[in-house]
Image: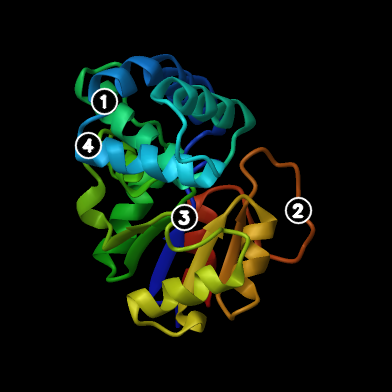
Amino acid sequence: MIKAVVTDIEGTTTPIAFVAETLFPYARQALPGFVATHHDRPDVAEQLVAARALAGDAGLSDAAVTALLIQWIDEDRKATPLKVLQGLIWVEGYEAGAFQGELYADVPPRLRAWHAEGLRLFSYSSGSVAAQRLLFGHSPAGDLTPLFEGFFDTRLGGKLESASYAALAAAIALPPGEILFLSDHEGELDAAAAIGFATGCLDRDGLGGSGRHPIHRDFRSVAAELATA
């Protein structure tokens, strides 16, 4: 019996275009000023140190680190320091009303229904925990964060690594077979399935999948399958 649903975000709960065309450009434009203004703030300074360590050069200037971070944005690199800094920048954007979190229309009602049914809900994304909370907390459907028991990011491990899903299962204290992981990325689903997770492949665009995982066009389809399991 499935007792928890863990969902990816980009392409699963949220259109890829929102991340690519709204969040990333906002962070890219704001990053130089944000670092210049907040480089002494402890949470920002910690990530700048981590970025220097990841680059293998502890002596990089703030300007050089900023240039490197922008390069990582352009490369869509899943670097934890970058993801954390992006999340901090997006806090300012959400709070200023520059944008709202965008979700597929089927997602909010299904999350509410699953929560009401007693399913435990979690998200696991390459975006930072802070960014996940902002997205669900500032959605057009209201603040959805109370529906979630927890949020996970790449500090847990890479999403293509089975060990990350083992760590996730341990963190929520459930056997893998009682957890359903939803994602649009079959590599992530492969990694989760390898340690026993149930999986569902979100095929929002109707392009089809390999068949290695159950395919769903939306969360309504996922719910229908759960109801018959």
Q: CA distance from mark 1 to mark 4?
A: 13 Å
**CB contact under 8 Å: marks 3 and 2:** no
Residue 212, compared with residue 15, is above or below; it is below
Q: CA distance from mark 3 to mark 4?
A: 26 Å
Task: Residue under label 1, please give it.
Answer: 94
Q: CA distance from mark 3 to mark 2?
A: 25 Å
Q: Which mark is residue 154?
A: 3
Q: Which mark is residue 159?
A: none
Q: Which is in the foreground here, disc 1 or disc 3?
A: 3
Task: Residue under label 2, please give it.
Answer: 209
Which SS class for mark 2?
loop
| Earlier sequence position, callout 4 versus callout 2 | 4
User: What percent of the width, then of the height, locates residue 15?
Assistant: 52, 34
**CB contact under 8 Å: marks 2 and 1:** no
Of 44 and 172, the residue lying toward us? 44
Tell me the kind of residue under disc 4.
Answer: Gly
| Earlier sequence position, callout 1 versus callout 3 | 1
Task: Residue under label 4, please give it.
Answer: 142
Which SS class for mark 4?
loop
